[in-house]
Amino acid sequence: MRETHLSLPELALIAGTRGMAGAGLGLLLADRMSDGPRKAVGWTLLLVGVLTTVPLAIQVLGASRSTDSADWADYRPDLSHTYTG
């Protein structure tokens, strides 16, 4: 199993780039607008989304670490904080 810790801004960047790529692909597949502007905006969004996703993916995958089941074998929850109503 792999474990990765992301900050909220990193997660927002990843979601934003994936959203841009998805919106661009959606525009390229749609037939609602005239061809010229739709294709220009669609290709731009798709390419920017893909090109910005690659470095983020490399950063995230490079920061992840492998966890073994042995790490969990020694886990014991701290039960010393019990409620004494």
Image (cartoon, grey):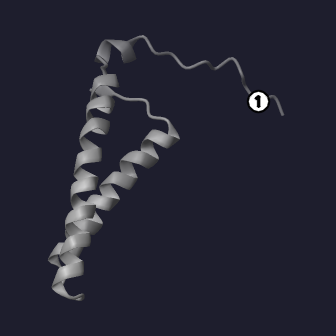
| Residue 66 horizontal/vertical position (percent) | 28, 19
The answer to whether residue 26 is seen in the rendering is no
Q: Residues within 10 Å of mark 1 (few under 14, many from 20)?
A: few
Q: Quick one: quadrant of the C terminus?
A: top right
Residue 39, picture quadrant: bottom left
| Residue 67 horizontal/vertical position (percent) | 31, 19
Which residue occupies 41% across, 46% down?
13
Q: Quick one: quadrant of the N terminus?
A: top left
| Residue 52 horizontal/vertical position (percent) | 29, 46
Which residue occupies 27% across, 54% down?
48
Residue 77 horizontal side relative to residue 74, left or right: right
Q: Is residue 48 above or below residue 22?
A: above
| Helix, strand or loop for disc 1 | loop
Q: As drawn, which residue projects farthest toward the right? A: 85
**Amino acid bearing label 1:** Tyr
The answer to whether residue 21 is seen in the rendering is yes
Q: Is residue 79 above or below residue 7?
A: above
21 or 77: nearer the viewer: 21
Q: Is residue 33 above or below residue 51?
A: below
83 or 10: nearer the viewer: 10
Which residue occupies 55% across, 20% down?
77
Q: Which residue, given by chain and number where applicable, does mark 1 sit on?
A: 83
| Residue 68 horizontal/vertical position (percent) | 29, 16
Which residue occupies 24% across, 87% down?
33
64 or 10: nearer the viewer: 10
Query: Exactly how many numbered labels are in the figure?
Result: 1
Q: Is residue 69 above or below residue 49?
A: above
Residue 75 horizontal side relative to residue 24, left or right: right
